[in-house]
Image: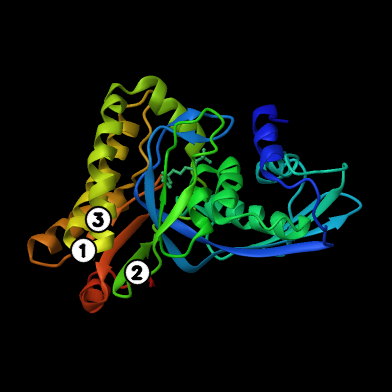
Amino acid sequence: MNPEAQRCVRSLIPAHAPRNPSGRAFAPSNIALCKYWGKRNEALKLPLTGSLSVSLGKLGSQVSIHLADQDSFQLNGEEVPPSHKARKRLFAYLDLFRQNAECFQVEAENTIPMGAGLASSASAFAAIAQAVDALYGWELSSEQLSILARMGSGSASRSIYEGFAEWVAGAREDGMDSYAVSIAPVWPEFRIGLLILSQAEKAVGSTEGMRRTRDSSSLFQSWPAQVERDLPAIRNAVLERDFSRLGQHAEQNALSMHATMASAWPPLIYAQPETLAVLHRVHTLRAEGLELYVTMDAGPNVKLLYLAQDREAVRSAFPEVQEVE
Ligand code: DP6
């Protein structure tokens, strides 16, 4: 049990609310264009800097929670055993919400591969927070739900929204000012192309990766300054629909984050040979005039950023691309 997080949850939830037998919610996955990497408080998952993301349409998590006689967790139709780390993490999170030692039957359907740098924890915890809200009948605001989701996984704070969302870092010690807000629901021409190069579970997850980078990379000292440049530039680029500006800052931001990871000890190198081949191919295509950029998270997969007008050119260069509107 995490007493600091427990206190925050207690301060958010109403004393009296009508409890339902079950709650259900969907949340989309999200890809950060300006990354969250590094915490100022691990227990509450408070970030060192702000971040900004775009949601992934129908790719995400559908979660149902029923009150039950004992805890159980089904993922994509299969029972997850009590020893599995995803199940332990889920119930450690749900412990924050139990009112009278009640038990939960949780069913989750993920439409994205787990642990492959495609942020399945983001959509999962955002959906769980909303399903718990529906179960207990709290009717919390989006900002409050974002705070609850954040305590499951930082990037989940942004998965409360469709479209572009900014997670404001906040300054308070209790994290009550650290939540995401919607900055633009749509940009119809904006496309994300997923290049899934590996579905293997990553060796070092984000929580440990951030800790290690923060503790051992001297390059990490320059990371907040990088975010200070990229975050307002990306926010304005979204608001003004300036795709080139967005792409440049998003790609530089992602590669800067990977530079801090690579300079940690032991080093964190998430890129595989295929990842680097894609990066070089993108740079060649860009030199030939195609407005194509990349972003990458804590994994080997690459997300291409482009506009709808270039989708044929992107598809002919990368026939295996999975496009998200
Ligand atoms: C590289 O949100 O998974 O995807 O808060 O420790 O659960 P925890 O980490 P998590 O980290 C995501 C890191 C990232 C960048 C991002 O999504 O902003």
Residue 96, x across and y down, in percent: 72, 39
Q: Return the residue at label 2.
A: 321
Which residue is drawn at the image coordinates 71% and 38% (left, top)?
10
Q: Return the residue at label 3.
A: 236
Quadrant for the N terminus in the image: top right
Which residue is drawn at the image coordinates 80% and 62% (left, top)?
22
Task: Tell which circle, 1 or 2, labels the residue nearer the N-terminal end.
Answer: 1
The nearer-to-camera label among 1 and 2 is: 1
Residue 9, x across and y down, in percent: 68, 40
- Could you tell me how far apart the alpha carbons at marks 3 and 1 are, in whole angstroms? 10 Å
**SS at circle 2:** loop
Q: Return the residue at label 1.
A: 243
| Mark 2 surroundings: few (<14), some (14-19) or many (≥20) residues within 10 A | some
Compared with 202, 207 (above or below) is: above
Q: Amino acid at mark 3?
A: Asn
**SS at circle 1:** helix
Which residue is drawn at the image coordinates 25% and 67% (left, top)?
306
Residue 158, x across and y down, in percent: 48, 52
Residue 233, x across and y down, in percent: 22, 50
Compared with 131, 309 (above or below) is: below
Would you say 314 lies left or right of 289 here? right
Q: Amino acid at mark 2?
A: Val
| Label drawn at residue 200 | none
Q: Amino acid at mark 1?
A: Phe
